[in-house]
Image (cartoon, grey):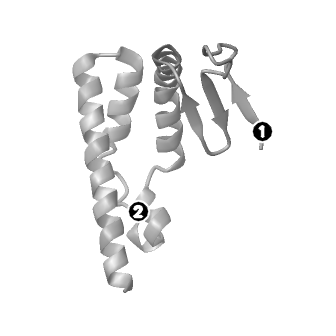
Amino acid sequence: EAAVQSQAKGKDGQPLLILSSSTLQVRSFDQLSHLLRIAMEKKLKEAHACLEANRDPVVKILGPGYETVEGEDMSILHLFDKVKKESDLETELKMKIILLLHQLDLQLLNSSLKQVSQ
């Protein structure tokens, strides 16, 4: 199993950060802070790529019979583009709330599908 490790070492000589295919070990707050800073820089790009690739996740889950109506409000994508361009705190908070509500919606949908399939 290949792993990536930090050059920084602890008093015991062990790397302070180790990343393998399925595990991340962080042994100092400095390394954790650095890791979170890097993740923060990439998060908007990743979220945008996910939204672009999955414009209508319900269709991917349930099939084409659940496609959205043409001309439907795509406000989440418009808001995401605004957050990306403006970096406004209020807009960013709205985006986070919308994404959390969307995640809750998908969790409820998943729970309903499990109950229906039993």
Q: Nearer the viewer, residue 116 or 98?
A: 116
Task: Tell me what residue is drawn at x 33 percent, y 40 percent.
Answer: 76
Dot 1 alpha-carbon crowd within 10 angstroms: few under 14, some 14 to 19, many 20 or more: few
* 80 lies left or right of 34: left
Question: Mark 2 or mark 1: which comes first in sequence?
Answer: 1
Above/below status of 62 relative to 71: below
Q: Where is residue 26 shown, x and y percent of the image?
A: 54, 27
Residue under label 2, please give it.
58
Q: Residues within 10 Å of mark 2 (few under 14, many from 20)?
A: some
Locate residue 59, reporting x and y percent: 45, 64
Q: Is residue 96 above or below residue 103?
A: above
Q: Quadrant of the N terminus?
A: top right
On the image, the x and y values in percent for residue 104 come to 28, 53
Identify the residue at image location x=61%, y=16%.
10
Q: Residue furthest right?
A: 2
- Which residue is under mark 1? 2
Q: Which residue type carries mark 2? A: Val
Q: Where is residue 80 shown, x and y percent of the image?
A: 37, 31
Q: Nearer the viewer, mark 2 or mark 1?
A: 1
